[in-house]
Image (tube, coloured by chain):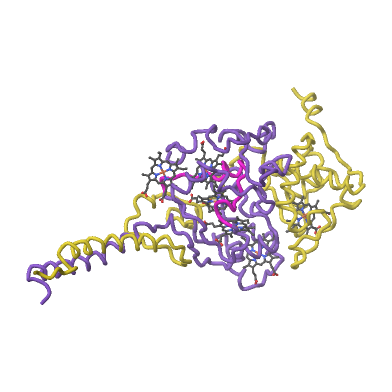
Chain colours: A yellow, B purple
């Protein structure tokens, strides 16, 4: 009787077939493991992933200074609102040039609060008293916004300070749209009122401006 | 001798085949399924040792302070140097770690931050669409405010996008204050008060006016139980929504 070996042609053939499959699966699986890596992976075939177009944060060989985010062409006008015209030291003209025409309502206040907490809170603190986290780490402490002095400022003056900055406070005209800035002004007014102050609002509602023209 | 001559030849041939398979298949398996797009855990060294853990985590600077454009644009730009200088003109202005930022600001040269998240050129993602639906950054980027060095948290595969589009409730983290996402009058707008989970607002079409105009409020009608973006725009599974 012939001894039957377990290793016959069929099993060997099976193993040979199985090894590549196992390896392939192992390769796939190890690619799924999120190793922390400092280098991007090698790509054998990157399909059409990398197209000749500029993505943000990628230098481009198209411009000499390699920047992909370009300054606006000279004479460009913003699509919404207008460029803030005054420099930091031209506070005096703010009252006549910029009037608060935004109607105050819950929605505007909510928007103002959201923008205030995003852009002002790091320095001025959530309560406006000037004790933000960045100040605790060494930024020049801003004066409180909920004192008589600040509530005596007109809406236009606060708008000016947000748009053009004051002293070491940076300007926010590039980060907040014009309407958003007025919404922040309304919000500051509302926290001043909560602290028992009577803000010197020089608000001029849209109604009166629109009746005088046309 | 255990094997017959024929079998021995077969084994030799098999050995060669196996060796070839080791080379090709492991590598195709590995690299074929690991490209820049899917590279979860990618964490390049940046030109400036900037830490989100410090700025967003400890100092509680909201994401939108720096990544300002997310609400309006498809991209969430990494901030320009002037944004850093808002604070670093005063704070730590002499630190050697800030040197490059200062130079960049003074000479008007961009800092070349290495890009981490990278969709292929033929797939289009739009941040504003998701941010206005009050989806938190953490749903897609993980808890960035705990990362000393940002890494990619998710494989940006098509399946990943579609998983969420089909069952948003399972994947979406509702807007958190640190992100600075506007949730309308009621800050709990994005959350189902009972389950604490995200609920989807029927949002405005992509072309609707910016927040700047305020005539149209952020979604007023909140439809519960229909947590799919099926009503809006192209529809979340329409190829041309992402591959236009």
Vertical placement of residue A113 versus B102, above or below: above
The single residue placed furthest to the bottom in the displayed view is B1
Left or right relative to A133: residue B170: left
Left or right relative to A202: residue B42: left
Vertical placement of residue A202 versus A62, above or below: above
Does residue B154 appear anywhere in the picture?
Answer: yes
Tell me if residue B132 is in the magenta stretch.
Answer: yes
Which residue shows up at 56% across the image and 47% down it?
A: B170
Q: Position of residue B201 (x, y in %)?
A: 62, 37
Does residue A174 appear anywhere in the picture?
Answer: no
Left or right relative to A107: residue A144: right
Q: Nearer the viewer, residue A128 or B237?
A: B237
The single residue placed furthest to the top in the displayed view is A214
Q: Position of residue B209 (x, y in %)?
A: 62, 34
Instruction: Using the rendered view, name the quadrant where residue B215 is placed.
Output: top right
Q: Position of residue B194 (x, y in %)?
A: 69, 43
Left or right relative to A176: residue A131: right
Instruction: Using the rendered view, name the quadrant where residue A211 is placed.
Output: top right
Q: For the magenta stretch, what is the residue range?
A: B121-142
Which residue shows up at 72% across the image and 47% down it?
A: A114
Which residue shows up at 42% across the image and 60% down it?
A: A32
Tell me if residue B189 is in the magenta stretch.
Answer: no
């Amino acid at each position: 009787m012939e001894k039957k070996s377990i290793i016959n042609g069929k099993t060997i053939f099976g193993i040979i077939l199985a090894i590549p499959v196992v390896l392939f699966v192992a390769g796939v699986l190890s690619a799924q493991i999120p190793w922390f890596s400092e280098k991007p992976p090698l790509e054998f075939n990157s399909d059409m992933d990398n197209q000749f177009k500029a993505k943000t944060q990628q230098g481009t060989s198209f411009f000499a200074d390699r920047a992909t985010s370009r300054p606006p062409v000279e004479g460009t006008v913003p699509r919404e609102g207008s460029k803030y015209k005054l420099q930091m030291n031209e506070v005096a003209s703010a009252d006549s040039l910029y009037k608060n025409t935004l109607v105050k309502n819950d929605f505007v206040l909510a928007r103002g609060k959201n923008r205030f907490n995003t852009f002002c809170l790091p320095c001025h603190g959530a309560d406006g008293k000037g004790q933000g986290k960045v100040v605790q780490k060494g930024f020049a402490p801003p004066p409180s916004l909920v004192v008589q002095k600040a509530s005596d400022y007109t809406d236009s003056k606060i708008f000016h300070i947000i748009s053009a900055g004051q002293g070491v406070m940076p300007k926010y005209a590039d980060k907040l749209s014009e309407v958003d800035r007025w919404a922040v002004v309304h919000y500051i007014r509302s926290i001043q009122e909560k602290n028992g102050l009577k803000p010197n609002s020089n608000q001029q509602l849209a109604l009166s401006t629109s009746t005088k023209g046309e | 001798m255990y094997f017959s001559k024929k079998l021995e030849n077969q084994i030799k041939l098999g050995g060669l085949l196996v060796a070839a398979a080791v080379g090709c298949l492991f590598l195709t398996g590995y690299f074929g399924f690991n490209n820049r797009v899917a590279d979860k855990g990618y964490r390049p060294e940046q030109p400036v040792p900037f830490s989100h853990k410090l700025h967003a985590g400890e100092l509680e600077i909201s994401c939108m302070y720096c990544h300002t454009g997310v609400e309006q644009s498809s991209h969430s730009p990494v901030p320009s140097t002037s944004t850093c200088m808002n604070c670093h003109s005063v704070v730590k202005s002499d630190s050697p770690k800030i040197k490059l930022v200062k130079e960049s600001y003074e000479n008007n040269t961009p800092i070349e931050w290495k890009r981490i998240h990278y969709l292929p050129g033929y797939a289009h993602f739009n941040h504003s669409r998701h941010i206005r639906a009050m989806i938190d950054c953490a749903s897609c980027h993980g808890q960035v405010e705990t990362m000393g060095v940002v890494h990619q948290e998710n494989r940006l595969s098509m399946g990943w996008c579609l998983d969420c589009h089909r069952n948003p409730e399972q994947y979406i983290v509702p807007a958190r204050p640190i992100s600075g996402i506007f949730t309308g009058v009621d800050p709990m707008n994005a959350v189902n008060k009972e389950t604490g989970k995200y609920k989807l607002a029927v949002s405005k079409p992509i072309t609707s006016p910016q927040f700047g105009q305020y005539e149209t409020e952020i979604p007023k009608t909140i439809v519960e139980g229909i947590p799919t973006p099926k009503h809006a725009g192209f529809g979340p599974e329409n190829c041309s929504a992402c591959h236009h």
